[in-house]
Image (tube, rainbow, N blue to C red):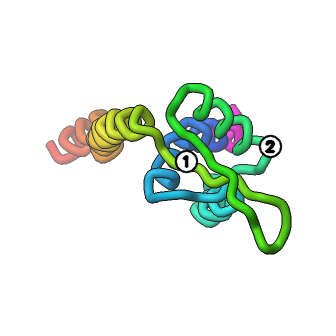
């Protein structure tokens, strides 16, 4: 099994959630999203971000507006729609349930280790 591939798949699984959270804070430009995701080590490239933003827009979760720029061409600034905000709230619930479940599983000691410790003490 390839560790790097598994790590990439885990990051991809939460990418949409993270993008929606970034956009939920207010109007945001795609390169700012990319910077934040890169800083957070969610390793995303433009080739991943832009198709995802298009998919979110087609699903009615985000919208954008063009804003003129003093330093070049106009820029797209993304915001959440009402449907996107509702969707994100549902994802928040799911995320918190997953974190709780994962913590429960990963914090438990191995039963075999506990059994071996008790039998070696007998």
Q: Nearer the viewer, residue 88 or 13?
A: 88
Pick whichever of labels 1 and 2 is earlier in the sequence: 1
Residue 110 seen: no
34 sits left or right of 104 in the view = right
Real-space Cα separation, disc 1 to disc 2, in angstroms? 15 Å
Element type where label 1 sits in the image:
helix
Q: Residue furthest front?
A: 68
Residue indicated by mark 1: 19
Number of residues whose C-alpha sits closer than 10 Å to that of mark 1, classed few (under 14), some (14–19) or many (20 or more): some
Q: Nearer the viewer, residue 79 or 45?
A: 79
Quadrant containing the N terminus is top right
Coordinates of residue 4 in the picture (x, y in percent): 70, 44
Q: Main secondary structure of the magenta part?
A: helix
Coordinates of residue 117 in the picture (x, y in percent): 24, 45
Coordinates of residue 27 in the picture (x, y in percent): 54, 57
Element type where label 2 sits in the image:
helix
* Residue sitting at x 61%, y 27%: 58
Relative to 66, does residue 99 appear above or below in the rendering? above
Q: Which dot marks residue 35?
A: none
Residue span colored magenta: 1-6
Q: Is residue 111 magenta?
A: no
Coordinates of residue 25 in the picture (x, y in percent): 44, 58
Residue indicated by mark 2: 47
59 sits left or right of 98 in the view = right
């Amino acid at each position: 099994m390839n560790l790097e591939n598994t790590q990439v798949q885990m990051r991809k699984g939460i990418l949409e959630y993270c993008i929606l959270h970034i956009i939920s804070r207010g109007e945001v430009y795609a390169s700012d999203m990319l910077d934040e995701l890169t800083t957070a080590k969610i390793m995303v490239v433009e080739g991943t971000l832009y198709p995802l933003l298009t998919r979110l827009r087609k699903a009615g979760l985000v919208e954008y507006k063009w804003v003129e720029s003093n330093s070049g061409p106009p820029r797209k600034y993304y915001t959440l729609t009402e449907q996107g905000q509702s969707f994100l709230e549902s994802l928040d619930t799911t995320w918190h349930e997953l974190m709780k479940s994962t913590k429960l599983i990963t914090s438990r000691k191995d039963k075999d280790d506990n059994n071996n410790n008790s039998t070696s003490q007998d």
